[in-house]
Image: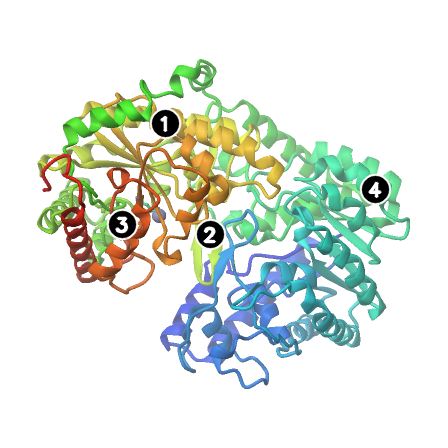
Amino acid sequence: MTLAHNLGFPRIGVHRELKTAQEAYWRGDINVTQLTTTGKELRARHWAQQAGVGMDFLPVGDFSWYDHILDLSAMLGVVPSRFDWDGGEVNLDTYFRMARGHAPSGNPASACEMTKWFDTNYHYIVPEFEAKQNFKLSCNKLFDEVSEAQALGYRVKPIIPGPLTYLWLGKSKGSALDKLDLLDALIPVYGEILNRLRAQDIEWVQLDEPILALDLPSAWQQAFEATYNRLQNSGLKLLLTTYFGCLQDNLTLACGLPVAGLHIDAVRAADEIDTVINWLPAYKVLSLGIIDGRNIWRADLRTLLERITAIKDRLGERLWLAPSCSLLHVPVDLTHETTLDEEFKSWLAFARQKLEEIVTLKRALNEGYEAVAEYLAASARAKHSRATSNRIHNATVKQDCASIDDTWVQRDSAYQQRAAKQTAWLRLPLYPTTTIGSFPQTDSIRKSRREFKQGRISEHDYKERMRREIAYTVAKQEQLGLDVLVHGEAERNDMVEYFGEQLDGISFSRNGWVQSYGSRCVKPPIIHGDVTRPKAMTVEWIRYAQSLTDKPMKGMLTGPVTILNWSFVRDDQSRADTCLQIALALRAEVTDLEAAGIRIIQIDEAALREGLPLRKKDWSAYLNWAVRAFRISAAGVDDTTQIHTHMCYSEFNDIIEAVAAMDADVITIETSRSDMELLNAFERFAYPNEIGPGVYDIHSPNIPSVADIMTLMQKAARYIPSERLWINPDCGLKTRAWPEVETALMHMVDAARKLRHAASRPMPFPAS
Ligand code: GLN
Ligand code: ZN
């Protein structure tokens, strides 16, 4: 019999019940008992749903109050000393303080770092190792949840991130520590955990080692052998679980480790299935992650079935079926979608539907295809309707993409000549000041948007209110003395959703929430078809904003790579092709803005780095098409029009050549948090165009002083000629409040004036 199991169910609840409860608890509106009751209800509901579908093993350990890596830190007693932990059971408030810095009880302390989970938009809390890190079993949550599921009568498979992945994801603060040196202390605690689980009558334990899909140094590869040799004595069956990519040079290692089973991502590593089977010892189970846990499309069951029937012939009982990875990365349940039409819905599968697909495949293998004939027919119908729908295919877009040649990728002249032309009309002072786009999203803005969405105010009134917000923001910037103004993005709910809603080929679910971190959930757009722009998206607003001032107004767009990377994408064409279509739509917007008299246009690529593939050898292919798409979106304008871009991270040393190849006239970038660490990149590589290294950390309520800003800029001026430096915050200001924004920008403008004054050489043009 082939078994079906799950690698993790979304924990947030179909109505984001977890978020509601977490936030109520943090505010002090509910107590810990009420909070834990919600958790218990969610777990019970999710287990019941999974069992109801027909899963053979239910996951335990996938539920988390914030993040599953933080759960493991709590279980292992990896609690930095600043959280005043007494060394006993790590309680919920200590846990929340690690995640957020504060909790209803306990002293506030700075939160642990958070970072992206592999190439997903989920964020985990980075384990923080101290010089003499001890490990000690310090939290019973997993064992309690195992008992809870067993009391409900379920057969469960606990899930724990494996020891190597855990160490890999952690950081040692202060001292330079070889994390592998921690293994000796860590493995016994894993041993203890496994013993406890065996005492709970557990048969299988899933140990997640997704780092096997990364380029690993050989010391880490070797550490796998040593570690799993030591863990094999637990008497439990271990399912070594990998996902998110191919195993490549780790393949024989993964197949050979002394465990009872191996799970592979059969979607992203589909080409490796046969090799894995060849290498897998005859006693091992192979769990095939056959259904895509990273996207929302319904599977083509017939094709999959043909594939796995052949595998079943080889493996027999040793074949298990699963989603490719945890279903944490997809929304919970499609049946709650009320706004998508039936045809569209028939193309989709969220977490619950994906489990149904897995069980259907299992039943087909165990009971014969006829047993699931109805499901196969429905899958075939959906496949056909999606392949032929005119909502998906647009011949004009395909022709446009095919007609792109190199002239589309190039501006008329090189940066040097463009810069001269732009300087001539812009007449900006040395160290021009600007902002990244958004200004505070105030309660009044949110209220207007809510009222408009609920139909309580007319479109006319809504637009009128937004115009007032824009006028206010423009007036403020003039008072502050900024050089290049923005309209403030009052009318935008979100930098991707705003464009997604206006582009054809992109749709939105009503309830398709996915956890991003903690209580924060996002509803990624679904790029379902060929993308087109039915009409101008931003021109009216920007033109209005420009009409209010003589200063240059910067048009503001989200770039093609960022729209792509923050969405669920089509699986019937390459990401590169989809990105190109979005780039063409944006190119039309850019030229429309130019035609409307907007001569500075910013195209944000906040998420360019996020799209980097997990393996370094795949980076250049990605960067090539991503950079090309950006250039296509930007290159339709005259030399005199200045193109800006913005990126939200400072680690770009390793991609600086690609960033330069985007050939934006000006780039603004995050740096202030890392104290201009980015500038190290310029020791190796002379960035050719203009750059605005962020001098004001908008992620913190702290207001930078004039002196702080001057110091940062003086540092920058050592690497980049001052004629090519801009002064700006390091990201948009939408999450901040007006009073702090005003003071911070006042300091910024003041610092710019002082720097100009101090500049020894004569200024090219009079300062404003
Ligand atoms: N223009 C956007 C803003 O200012 C950029 C946001 C971002 O980089 N994440 O809000
Ligand atoms: Zn940013």
Q: Name the residue under label 4.
A: 277
Q: Mark 3 points at which residue?
A: 454
Q: Are marks 2 and 3 in contact (CB under 8 Å)?
A: no
Image quadrant assignment for residue 300 = top right
Identity of the residue drawn at 53% across and 63% down: 126
Element at badge 4?
helix
Q: Look at the image and tell me in which quarter the C terminus lies.
A: top left
Q: Name the residue under label 2.
A: 513
Disc 4/disc 1 C-alpha distance (Å): 45 Å
Q: Residue 633 carries which label?
A: 1
Identity of the residue drawn at 81% across and 54% down: 261
Question: Which of the two residues, 214 or 156, is positioned nearer the viewer here?
Answer: 214
Disc 4/disc 3 C-alpha distance (Å): 55 Å
- Answer yes or no: is residue 534 visible: no
Element at badge 1?
helix
Q: Within 8 Å: ligand 1 and the Cβ of disc 2?
A: no
Viewer-nearest of discs 4 and 1: 1
Viewer-nearest of discs 4 and 2: 4
Left or right of 485? Residue 215 is right
Disc 4/disc 2 C-alpha distance (Å): 36 Å
Of the residues under marks 4 and 1, which one precedes in the sequence? 4
Question: Which of the two residues, 414 or 209, is positioned nearer the viewer here?
Answer: 414
Disc 2/disc 3 C-alpha distance (Å): 20 Å
Q: How crowded is mark 2: few (under 14 residues within 10 Å), some or many (20 or more)?
A: many
Left or right of 378? Residue 559 is left
The picture places residue 306, in percent across and down from the top left corner, at 77, 33
Name above or below for residue 596 compared with residue 183.
above
Of the residues under marks 4 and 2, which one precedes in the sequence? 4
Q: How crowded is mark 4: few (under 14 residues within 10 Å), some or many (20 or more)?
A: some
